[in-house]
Amino acid sequence: MKQLKTDVAIIGAGTAGLSAYRAAKKAGKQAILIEGGQHGTTCARVGCMPSKLLIAAAEAAHTAANAAPFGVHIQGSVRIDGKQVMDRVKRERDRFVGFVLDSVEGIPADEKVSGYARFLSDTVLQVDDHTEITAGSIVIATGSSPFVPDAYRSGGDRVIVNDDVFYWDDLPASVMVVGSGVIGLELGQALARLGVQTTIVNRSGGVGGITDPEVRASAAAAFLDELALELNAEIKSVRRAGEQLEVVYQAENGEEHTASVDYLLVATGRRPNLKALDLHNTSATLDDKGMPEYDAATLQIGTSPIFIAGDVNGVLPLLHEAADDGQFAGDNAASYPNVQPAQRRAPMAVVFTDPQLAQAGVRYKDLPAQGVAIGEVDFRNQGRSRVMLKNRGKLRVYASVRDGRFLGAEMAGPAMEHIAHLLAWAVQKKLTVAEMLKMPFYHPVVEEGLRTALRDCARKLVEAELEQVCEGDQAVNNA
């Protein structure tokens, strides 16, 4: 068996792993990158980029099919060529993957090892049956994988996950999507707009991870107008019937329905790729699912020289967060045992549906129970949104009553990917609502809707301040 020594070993060459490798090298350390699967990152190969390619095709089809209200009429029906759609998705996907492969190709051969790593101790790894690596510190960046519950496995290869969609050569006739989270909603709406008979079933009332009940209700109403979306529903059975599946599900009203579909697309979450690492051979404390206890600020597992970064740690499964995680873990692995807490950016997340869903800063569910003012705008009557016939959804902004500082927002509406960036920047700069309202707002733009919400929040901040003054006066009088 080949014996190698290095300062830092990184398990996984995805977004977090590559970022950790670069950070360790920048710190002047020796580093070895270990990868057992395909190179190319989850985002480029089966995540962010191919899904946005499919969504772009779906938006083009939807725009063409719904042009009549603008006085634009297409003769005949819109024809969608599924083979052409998937051909472009795969071609462009492969182009993005190629950029990552070029980056990996640039890494010296003696700093890359192919195979699956497992721990022999805190500082020793075995890669397959060919290499043993002793490292001063180790970064786990093995990512995550879609999870399929056992109840659905009887459907065989007709039960799929989102990764499988991007290897299709053609679009199917029908799909049932399990889960109305980010992946389920994005792919479900895109497939429906591309002519695939699509039903989305979710066992709760959740929509795209939105936690603000009013924003969630506005989003759900918008999706229900367009999609076969069954919230608070339960799949009772899945049975293979030739080249299709018979799926029985119970709707929110208690009625049972049977659907025959080509595929059951399971989008019920992802699990960290940890099982094959043999972490029981290390000093890590593991929970009943095999997840190690680690410091979320430093990404260090216990007091060991092992760090965990990216989707595998289950915190923020987003590309920009994985890249940051990799850098933090790589820096700390390089400087071990002198580790430092990460300086995080303001949280932000976007769901690329129509309407778009987004979050910036503190989520509604994480707001303090008191001392918060909430402003809102409903996009139904927002000028630019009505011009584009994209007037659906609601934006709610949150601020601290104590000092007027902007805390965060959740939103459903048009172009929320851009609004979310503005608001995440405001959170990171610790701006107050008053300071935000001093910023320029052009006309007519969707951002004017944001201004409406901020003005509403500013009024409520003044009301809260007056209420506190009155309470103070009352307390004095009572004394």
Image: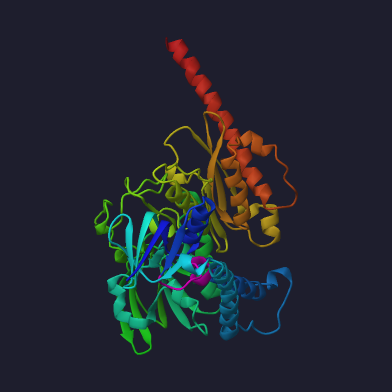
**Image quadrant for the N terminus?**
bottom left
Up-down relation of residue 174 to residue 23 (above or below)? below
Image spot of residue 311 (x, y percent): 43, 59
Quick one: which residue is furthest to the top in this view? 479
Q: Position of residue 121 (x, y in %)?
A: 28, 57
- Residue 236: horizontal and vertical position, in percent? 29, 72
Residue 205 shows up from this direction: no
- Compared with 71, 445 (above or below) is above
- Residues rendered magenta in the picture: 36-46
Q: Which quadrant: the C terminus?
A: top left
Of residues 476 and 297, the one drawn nearer to the viewer in this rendering: 297
* Magenta segment includes 41: yes
Q: Is residue 152 left or right of residue 299?
A: left
Residue 439's quadrant in the figure? Answer: top right
> What residue do we see at 48% from left, 17% from top?
472
Q: Residue at x 48, y 71 (%)?
A: 39
Q: Is residue 396 above or below residue 229?
A: above
Residue 244 part of the magenta-drawn span: no
Colour mode of the rendering: rainbow
Given residues 333 and 142, the one toward you in this image is 333
Q: Nearer the viewer, residue 450 or 266?
A: 266
Image quadrant where residue 149 sits: bottom left
Q: Residue furthest bottom?
A: 242
What residue is shown at x 75% (from left), y 49% (from top)? 443
Estimate the x, y position of residue 160 in percent, counting from the top left. 40, 76
Residue 55, located in which quarter of the rendered image?
bottom right
